[in-house]
């Protein structure tokens, strides 16, 4: 092998700041190949793809825009190619979230027909709240009947073909947003319709107008939002609305004396059952010499079971292969999304069983236990038996578990947040938050969301943004793998408040601690974990509540989103609805859009003019803090000026502009 090639392929163990992940990578030194190594081998990556100007939509391609060839074979301009690629990425994300939401609708429907006997309504109060949210009357209705009505509404939002508003948009966003969607003709007819339309519209020789294409992308992103909200609401009805819970995170949660199961993927339909079965199957584990069965989470499944069951979080997206390399994971159970096929090859070097569970999400060579709603617990037990078999084949001399773990307090649904605020202001809980911003105690709210991406140092951008915002008195809520970063690196507990929060944020959190002292088992964390990526819907609900309290539309609210290490198409879809729903949205990894100044300009500037939300591409994490603070400050300042004008001229409405 040439020297140059050797250098290029050298494992790069320094692509993470997580000390536990580093420990495993250093020890491995490239012997077992992981994503960290493959990223290095993949360099240099194609710049046509990176900037979005490669079209493979028809068989005459790939067409790439160069100085010599300024259009594709069919005459498509760069802006058409970039816009089509972009909205197909939004569509991929919406398709994945639709898959998740649809699975919940299906399971609940089977349940009320008596065909999914292991599931039941865990949270009837949430069922009533959801019913009211979507405009149903709840008086005198039986639980089962009410759920059937909610499910009919969900099916309608997923499939209808007319122009009636979606229940899960009309009930969740401000009236101002609904008017905006109507004005711009971006209200989706339904989740599936929008997804299908986007594929049709981006077929070869259909739409070549980049603005029209981007608007269709935004329409699809709203369908994505509705699908996520349905997924969150139905999960809460089925498994309970999250409440504050304290657990642990990072590799140190692996217990060598237990049968260890890593739960990885997204949908709680599977993981909740496995957690339940694991608690029941301790005797079987003891029979093979273990102390019991321990479940731990990875990615958004990890967030789901942490939020509701207090199950420890093992790690986030990028380091998902590494738990296997501790030699003490007996099974990794996966369902859908963000599961690297690479886990299988790593597992081949150890005793770990990789178990796929969904008919549409298989990995060659893995065990497959088809999960079905009608026999959910039976399937969960079958999976745990496989893990116990795995335990028997452990190689003791290969077990080496990093000791690092941190306390994490999670479980902050909007309901849980409002409970905390209600202890201070029972009549109007959300006013506790808006008052803190009005008084300058807090500078605003930031939602930290999204993935990991090897194009930036794993966990580094996220932690830098967290520390910078904390110091500057920004209240943070988090979801997805960014919540994972915070949890596993010790930023999601009470100690982090003392270490990193500025005076305003600290006093705000202390006030909530004191007001809720009788209810909380643990003091509140620096960052409020709102759940998995579909739970970005919860995070947005907080924005709507703030807007309604101030009597403004969301583009005026000092509430921004930040995805410092975005990776997936789902992140593109979420970012797009954040913008459409009025938020400044920072992305720390520039997406494949810069090949067209026009489309890039729509994302960065025109979006702001039309929707009030806009994208910010900033890859430097320190600068990201500055731009996020500037975005919050601009809104707080404007709101103050508008309010002063309103008082001076005694008008009823605050300025409509942003
Ligand atoms: O839905 S944050 S890497 S795990 S896509 Fe995936 Fe990104 Fe993680 Fe959850 Ni969300
Ligand atoms: Fe090329 Fe046009 Fe076909 Fe795209 S659709 S691959 S630009 S010919």
Image (cartoon, rainbow, N blue to C red):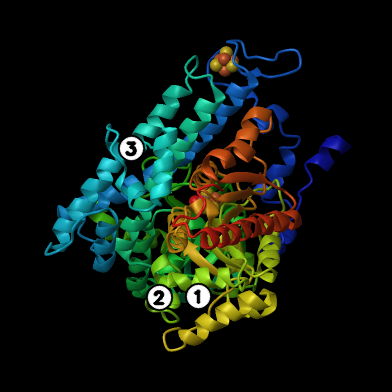
Rendering coords of residue 218 (x, y %): 48, 37
Q: Determine if the C-beta at disc 3 is less than 8 A from ligand 1.
A: no
Whether residue 28 is visible to the viewer of this picture, yes or no, is: no
Mark 3 in CB contact with mark 1 (< 8 angstroms): no
Q: Dot 3 lies on which element?
A: loop
Among the two numbered marks 2 and 1 on one chain, the one whose residue lies closer to the N terminus: 1
The residue singled out by tag 1 in the image is 247
Please determine whether, in this image, residue 184 is positioned above or below residue 537.
above
Q: Within 10 angstroms of label 2, few (less than 14), some, or many (20 or more) residues? A: some
- In whole angstroms, how far apart are the C-alphas of marks 3 and 1? 39 Å
Quarter of the render that holds ligand 2: top right
Which of the pair 525/542 is nearer the observer?
Answer: 542
The residue singled out by tag 3 in the image is 190
Q: Determine if the C-beta at disc 2 is less than 8 A from ligand 1.
A: no
Q: Which mark is residue 551?
A: none
The residue singled out by tag 2 in the image is 419
Rendering coords of residue 622 (x, y %): 75, 57
């Amino acid at each position: 092998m040439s020297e140059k090639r050797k250098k290029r392929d050298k494992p790069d163990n320094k692509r993470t700041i997580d000390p536990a992940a580093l420990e495993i990578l250093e020890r491995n030194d490239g012997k077992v190949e992981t994503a960290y190594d493959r990223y290095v081998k993949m360099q240099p990556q194609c710049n046509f793809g990176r900037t979005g100007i490669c079209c493979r939509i028809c068989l005459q391609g790939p067409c790439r825009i160069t100085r010599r060839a300024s259009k594709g074979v069919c005459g498509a301009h760069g802006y058409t190619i970039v816009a089509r690629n972009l909205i197909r990425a939004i569509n991929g994300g919406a398709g994945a979230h639709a898959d998740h939401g649809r699975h919940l609708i299906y399971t609940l429907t089977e349940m009320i027909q008596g065909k999914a006997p292991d599931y039941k309504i865990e949270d009837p109060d949430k069922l009533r709240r959801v019913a009211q949210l979507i405009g149903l009357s709840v008086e005198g209705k039986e639980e089962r009947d009410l759920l059937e009505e909610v499910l009919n509404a969900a099916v309608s939002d997923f499939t209808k073909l007319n122009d009636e508003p979606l229940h899960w948009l009309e009930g969740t966003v401000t009236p101002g947003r609904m008017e905006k969607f109507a004005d711009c003709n971006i209200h989706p007819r339904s989740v599936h319709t929008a997804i299908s339309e986007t594929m049709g519209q981006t077929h070869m020789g259909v739409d070549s107008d980049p603005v029209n294409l981007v608007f269709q992308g935004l329409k699809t992103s709203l369908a994505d939002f509705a699908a996520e909200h349905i997924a969150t609401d139905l999960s809460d009805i089925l498994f309970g609305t999250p409440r504050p819970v304290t657990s642990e995170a990072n590799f140190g949660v692996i217990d060598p004396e237990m049968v260890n199961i890593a739960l990885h993927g997204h949908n709680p339909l599977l993981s909740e059952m496995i957690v339940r079965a694991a608690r029941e199957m301790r005797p079987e584990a003891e029979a093979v010499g273990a102390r019991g069965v321990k479940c731990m989470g990875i990615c958004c499944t990890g967030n789901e079971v942490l939020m509701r069951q207090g199950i420890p979080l093992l790690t986030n997206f990028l380091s998902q292969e590494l738990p296997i390399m501790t030699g003490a994971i007996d099974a990794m159970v996966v369902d859908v999304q963000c599961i690297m096929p690479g886990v299988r090859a790593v597992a081949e070097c150890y005793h770990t069983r990789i178990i796929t569970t969904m008919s549409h999400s298989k990995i060659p060579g893995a065990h497959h236990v088809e999960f079905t709603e009608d026999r959910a617990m039976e399937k969960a037990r079958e999976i745990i038996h496989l893990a116990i078999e795995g335990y028997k084949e452990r190689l003791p001399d290969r077990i080496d578990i990093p000791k690092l773990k941190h306390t994490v307090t999670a479980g902050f649904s909007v309901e849980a947040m409002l409970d905390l605020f209600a202890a201070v202001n029972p009549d109007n809980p959300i006013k506790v938050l808006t008052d803190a911003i009005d008084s300058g105690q807090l500078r605003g709210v930031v939602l930290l969301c999204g993935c990991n991406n090897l194009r930036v140092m794993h966990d580094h951008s996220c932690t830098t943004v967290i520390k910078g915002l904390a110091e500057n008195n920004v209240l943070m809520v988090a979801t997805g793998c960014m919540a994972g970063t915070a949890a596993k690196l010790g930023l999601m507990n009470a100690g982090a408040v003392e270490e990193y929060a500025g005076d305003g944020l600290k006093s705000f959190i202390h006030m909530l601690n004191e007001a809720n002292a009788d209810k909380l088992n643990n003091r509140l964390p620096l960052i409020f974990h709102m759940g998995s990526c579909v739970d970005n819907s919860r995070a947005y609900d907080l924005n709507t509540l703030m807007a309604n309290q101030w009597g403004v539309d969301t583009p005026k609210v000092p509430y921004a989103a930040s995805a410092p290490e975005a990776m997936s198409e789902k992140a593109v879809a979420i970012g797009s609805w954040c913008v459409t729903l009025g938020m400044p949205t920072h992305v720390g990894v520039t997406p494949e859009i810069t090949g067209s100044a026009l489309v890039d300009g729509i994302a960065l500037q025109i979006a702001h003019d039309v929707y009030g939300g806009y994208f910010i591409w900033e890859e430097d994490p320190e600068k990201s803090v500055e731009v996020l603070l500037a975005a919050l400050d601009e809104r707080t300042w404007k709101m103050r000026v508008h309010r002063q004008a309103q008082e001076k001229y005694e008008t009823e409405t605050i300025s409509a502009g942003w």
